[in-house]
Amino acid sequence: MKSFKNIFSKITLLPKTLYILLFVVLNLSCEKDNKAELDFEFQVTESYLYPDKHVTGTFNISPVGGVEPYSVKWFYPDFQTWENPFSVYTDSTLILDFEILDAEQNKKRFIYELSADSIGEQAKDYRFQYTGMYDCEINYEYEGSSRIHHDTLKVTTTNDPFYNINISIKNNKGNWVGNGMRYLWSNSFYGYHSDVTFTKDSIYYRSNGPLGFYYTEMYKGRKITQ
């Protein structure tokens, strides 16, 4: 049997290129073994609580492990984008079903249970999304005639928790005159001969005159301040 010394002496005579090749193979093997398995971190960045106990939440899915860059494929909900942030609406438990794909085509599917309670732990009053000043174009119609002008609407909360907001406009004396609006659903409210809907940073407010004075004012505007 050959001694260890003889074997070692022959190994030392191997070409340098073979040593390099062995080093690269061993190094790649170690990297492969040490590479973390695909996983993700979940973070709610913003959430709002509504009177009917539903919540909306905006969150990020941050893949970890594998090799960057990543993409996320959604099975449920059917988000139209694969990029952060994502937004959900729920009043109970929502199951997130998605797959993460890394740059080396490694992929892993995840099922994540998202409850309304977990989203709502840091939830804000939903009305804070809408408060502020809005620059509006107003279409005024009365007895078949119409005119368009611009004005500013102010949206504020009230002391009645969750249900009411005020929509105010300045009168001829420069004082803000408010119209109380009550929660209808999600981003909509109603008031006396009036209704309003908010979409992102836009407002759509309609005010109708009382009996005997059938005018209609349609406000369409964009938020200019919080």
Image (cartoon, rainbow, N blue to C red):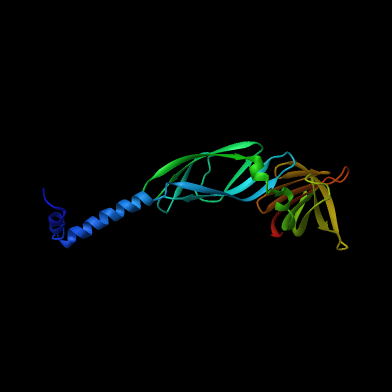
Q: Classify residue 167 as left or right of residue 22.
A: right
Nearest to the observer: residue 33 or residue 153:
33
Q: Residue at x 16, y 53 (%)?
A: 4
**Looking at the image, how many numbered discs can be counted on the residues?**
0
Nearest to the observer: residue 77 or residue 104:
104
Location of residue 135 with respect to 190 vertically, above or below: below
Q: Residue at x 30, y 53 (%)?
A: 28
Q: Quadrant of the C terminus?
A: bottom right
* Residue 187 x, y percent position in the rendering: 70, 45
* Residue 87 x, y percent position in the rendering: 59, 46
Q: Classify residue 31 as left or right of residue 56.
A: left
Location of residue 9 with respect to 210 vertically, above or below: below
Location of residue 177 with respect to 97 vertically, above or below: below
Nearest to the observer: residue 205 or residue 6:
6
The picture quadrant where one finds residue 106 is top left
Which residue extends farthest left?
1
The picture quadrant where one finds residue 15 is bottom left
Q: Classify residue 56 as left or right of residue 100.
A: right
* Residue 53 x, y percent position in the rendering: 72, 39
Location of residue 42 with respect to 113 vertically, above or below: below
